[in-house]
Image: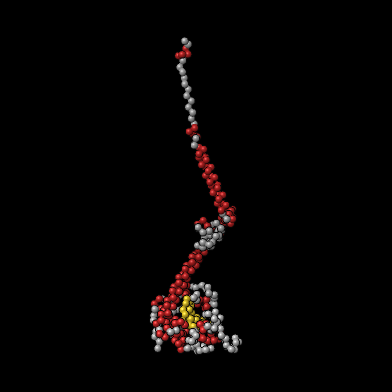
Amino acid sequence: MSDDSTRPIVIKRIKKGGAAAHGGAWKIAYADFVTAMMAFFLLMWLLGSTAKGDLEGIADFFQNPMTMASSGGSGVGDASSIIQGGGTDLTRSSGQVKKGEIEDEKRRIAIRERRKEFERREREALERLKEKIEKAIEASPELRQFKNQLLLDITTEGLRIQIVDEQNRPMFDLASDQLKPYTREILRQIGVVLNDVPNRISLAGHTDAAQFAGGPQGFSNWELSANRANASRRELVRGGLDDHKVIRVVGLSSSVLFDPNDPLNPVNRRISIVVLNKRTEMAILNEEGPEADIDVDMAGEPPPAESLQRPLPARP
């Protein structure tokens, strides 16, 4: 036997390593890449959804940031407000708020709200006045018989009280401004009620379409309607109405017919008394249109409810 049988056998085991040391590095690099791509696409989306004016504002800011920051501009300071351009007007889509503009807008909103509240309370006061006059008509035997000739309604100008003619019960003598005795009583009773409210009064006289023999160049329905309106004013004053409450007395002839389908209908001959709301009163005094603004601070308050609850004094 040779000596090979006694030679020791050596087994070499090769240990493979190193994979654990660098196996997770690619994951971190991939996550950084995905994050960068996400940021890139988000930037592209923002640029695509931004208006041209805003893009120009951003470009101007980066070109000269100090000038834009000091002077303002589209996009400067807008990030502090959910409304582009700032302010409380949700209809605005662009523009930068000027100094004090937000306060001015808040003041205008507050004035509008106060005006609406004033007009609401004023309308309620006119509704109470309407109910008071209707109750007075029902309670008075003298006035109840003329119920059909007294028409009350609320208009855009205020509470309108119309005294109309009936076929066999005219308010005036024929073609004259002389009041019938019962018409005087009606006007004097109304004058007592109207003097209890602070509102101003407007009177208008109306006729039917029947013309005078002399034609429009002579004495006409224009003069007749104006004379009748002024005669009604005098009776209201005799009833207790302060003459200074009347701010308009006009004659409208047959230009505003109550029954336009029948110009000769007796109902077209009437006197209209309007308890003016504040808006119409200011429009008349300022010679402005019907949309004249109300300065609520100067408008005063609508009449209190208790002032409309006093009963009508009995007339001799």
Q: Pinpoint residue 1: horizontal percent, then vertical percent.
A: 47, 10
- Can residue 90 be seen by looking at this rendering? yes
Q: Which of 105 and 226 is in front in this view?
A: 226
Residue found at x 46% / y 15% = 7
Counting the numbered discs, the total is 0
User: Which residue is more in the foreground, 272 or 171?
Assistant: 171
Q: Is residue 218 left or right of residue 154?
A: right
Residue 56 point in image, percent of width and height:
59, 55
Residue 107 visible in the current orientation: no
Looking at the picture, the colour scheme in use is secondary structure
The residue depicted at 44 percent of the width and 75 percent of the height is 127
Task: In the displayed orientation, state which residue is furthest to the right.
Answer: 217
Of residues 183 and 53, the one nearer the viewer is 183
230 lies above or below 14 = below
Quadrant containing the C terminus in the rendered view? bottom left
**Which residue is situated farthest in the top direction here?**
1
Question: Which x, y percent locates residue 33?
Answer: 53, 42
Residue 299 drawn at (x, y percent): 47, 75
Residue 133: image quadrant is bottom left
The residue sitting at 47% across, 21% down in the picture is 11
The relative height of residue 38 versus residue 168 in the rendered view (above or below) is above
The image quarter in which residue 118 lies: bottom left
Please say if 22 is above or below 282: above
